[in-house]
Image: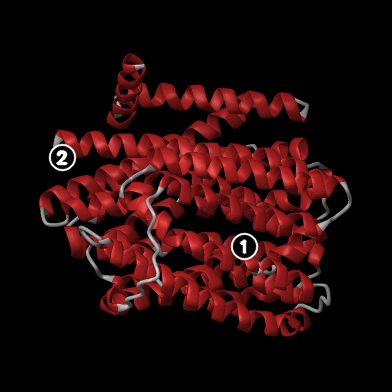
């Protein structure tokens, strides 16, 4: 990797980590406050709408965001074309969902969803205005500016949600939080990007990207279904209280794994696009990103599983005890989720949206089959099977990576195995050392500190190159300051 690309990648990872870290800290703070103020049923009624808003978001972007990032030198006309396409599609989709709101409420046996869904669906209508700005910032690796935008949006929306929850607005506080968040996020994006849209509408660039974009659209919808299929099914089969417990567990799990996934995801596609014409170099870059991801993901997710009980009880209270076991099981699968981001970006950077699409078609088909077979065994069994499946399905993506860049199973095991084993043994040792302690606060703090110290020592003693490079980069940053 040339020094310029290496420095650019390292800086991108640094600001990506800062962005993800800031996002998760603010989500943690407001998540704790709202979790204490609201009931599982409040989270359940909003949670069942997640799949609709997410799919609507997929429809409006139609995969053209990734299409813009994949272009070597996108023009203003390319951005403008995608902007107007997104706006027109989002208006159409919102109109359809507006009139379908009563059917959604009927499906979940919850009349309140009619009005609530019509309001929540405004989020994707508003977000369509900022999709091309986000593509511009991601393409140019403006990760510091993305961090600022995310922080401002989370701080503003979290404050609004908290104030409304304090004043008894129940689930409406969560709905308003979503709408305010996307509004503030777009305003910040507009501030940092040049004027992209104009009234000269030319859909030529959209037509040229249509085949690539539509494959990504199908894939993104399938991904959305995959990520939200359990919430959707639970909303139909179980009371809103049970749905709320799963929604809460899934939220904390997603916050943790997305910290890692977003850190590498913000730079993965641009970097892979820049080296895709150099096969040996491409493989080297890909493997290094895998090692960095493993270095962060395994200790973060296994650590959260270790302290899940104390974390839930200390932060949002005993009324959420039912979400503890669900969170622990989700964390096992969540440790492997960030690797999906790298595999998928590898396929996209090579223009293989067809492979991306069919892999995800197979994934959702098998997940639905698992649900059909196991739904009568209850929520816990379904979540356990879902987490195990996430781990096993990576074998398919590994085969694709081998075909694309030549990375073998043995090489991947060498890259990921040591970090996985080190993280697992760290948590096992920590559990034994703290098993005699009592009190949630003492237990939580002791486990976090001991696990962090032990993992750091293990990495130092094993001379982990990733750790040394991270420390060297941090020292260089401090010297410049």
Residue lying at the far right in this picture: please name it.
168
Residue lying at the far top in this picture: please name it.
479
Q: Nearer the viewer, mark 2 or mark 1?
A: 2
Tag of residue 374: none
Q: CA distance from mark 2 to mark 1?
A: 41 Å
Residue at left offset 45%, top offset 58%: 391
Characterize the local packing of mark 2: few (<14), some (14-19) or many (20 or more) Cα atoms within 10 angstroms: few
Residue at left offset 24%, top offset 68%: 351
Q: Image check: 207 left or right of 265?
A: left
The foreground one among 196 and 312 is 196
Percent position of residue 182, x then y: 59, 56
Residue 25 in sight from this viewpoint: yes
Percent position of residue 412, x then y: 28, 50
| Circle 1 SS class | helix
User: Residue 312 sits in which quadrant?
Assistant: top right
Residue at left offset 50%, top offset 63%: 129
The foreground one among 429 and 213 is 213
Q: Earlier in the sequence, mark 2 or mark 1?
A: 2
Please report contact status of discs 2 and 1: CB closer than 8 Å, yes or no: no
From the image, tell me which residue sits under label 2: 1
235 up-or-down from 193: above or below: below
Tag of residue 383: 1
Residue at left offset 66%, top offset 43%: 156
| Circle 2 SS class | loop
Characterize the local packing of mark 1: few (<14), some (14-19) or many (20 or more) Cα atoms within 10 angstroms: many
Q: Image check: 53 left or right of 78?
A: right
């Amino acid at each position: 990797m040339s020094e310029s690309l290496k420095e650019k990648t390292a800086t991108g990872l640094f600001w990506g980590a800062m962005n993800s870290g800031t996002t998760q800290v603010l989500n943690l703070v407001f998540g704790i406050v709202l979790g204490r103020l609201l009931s599982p049923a409040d989270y359940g009624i909003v949670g069942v709408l997640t799949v609709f808003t997410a799919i609507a978001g997929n429809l409006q972007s139609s995969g053209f965001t990734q299409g813009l990032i994949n272009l070597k030198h996108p023009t203003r006309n390319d951005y403008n074309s995608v902007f107007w396409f997104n706006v027109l599609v989002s208006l159409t989709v919102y109109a359809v969902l507006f009139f379908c709101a009563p059917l959604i409420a009927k499906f979940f046996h919850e009349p309140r969803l009619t009005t609530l869904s019509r309001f929540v669906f405004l989020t994707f209508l508003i977000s369509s205005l900022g999709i091309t700005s986000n593509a511009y910032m991601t393409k140019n690796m403006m990760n510091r500016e993305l961090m600022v935008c995310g922080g401002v949006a989370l701080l503003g929306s979290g404050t609004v949600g908290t104030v409304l929850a304090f004043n008894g607005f129940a689930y409406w506080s969560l709905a308003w939080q979503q709408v305010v968040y996307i509004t503030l996020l777009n305003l910040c994006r507009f501030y940092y990007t040049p004027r992209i849209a104009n009234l000269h509408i030319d859909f030529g660039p959209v037509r040229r990207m249509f085949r690539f974009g539509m494959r990504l659209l199908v894939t993104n919808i399938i991904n959305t279904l995959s990520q939200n299929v359990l919430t959707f099914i639970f909303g139909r089969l179980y009371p809103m209280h049970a749905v709320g417990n799963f929604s809460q567990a899934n939220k904390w799990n997603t916050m943790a794994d997305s910290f890692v996934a977003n850190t590498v995801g913000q730079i993965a596609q641009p970097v892979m696009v820049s080296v895709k014409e150099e096969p040996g170099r491409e493989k080297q870059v890909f493997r290094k990103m895998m090692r960095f991801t493993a270095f962060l993901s395994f200790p973060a997710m296994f650590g959260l599983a270790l302290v899940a009980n104390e974390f839930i009880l200390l932060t949002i209270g005993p009324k959420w005890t039912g979400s503890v076991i669900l969170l622990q099981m989700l964390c096992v699968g969540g440790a492997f989720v960030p690797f999906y981001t790298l595999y998928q970006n590898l396929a996209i950077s090579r223009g293989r949206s067809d492979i991306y699409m069919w892999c995800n078609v197979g994934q959702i088909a098998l997940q639905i089959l698992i649900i059909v077979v196991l739904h009568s065994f209850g929520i816990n069994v379904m979540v356990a099977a879902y987490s195990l499946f996430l781990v096993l399905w990576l074998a398919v993506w590994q085969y694709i990576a081998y075909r694309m860049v030549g990375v073998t199973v043995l090489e991947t095991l060498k890259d990921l195995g040591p970090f996985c084993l080190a993280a697992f043994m760290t948590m096992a040792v920590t559990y034994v050392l703290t098993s005699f302690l009592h009190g949630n606060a003492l237990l939580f703090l002791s486990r976090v500190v001991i696990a962090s110290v032990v993992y750091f020592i293990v990495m130092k003693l094993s001379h982990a190159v990733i750790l040394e490079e991270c420390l060297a980069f941090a020292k260089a940053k401090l010297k410049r300051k």
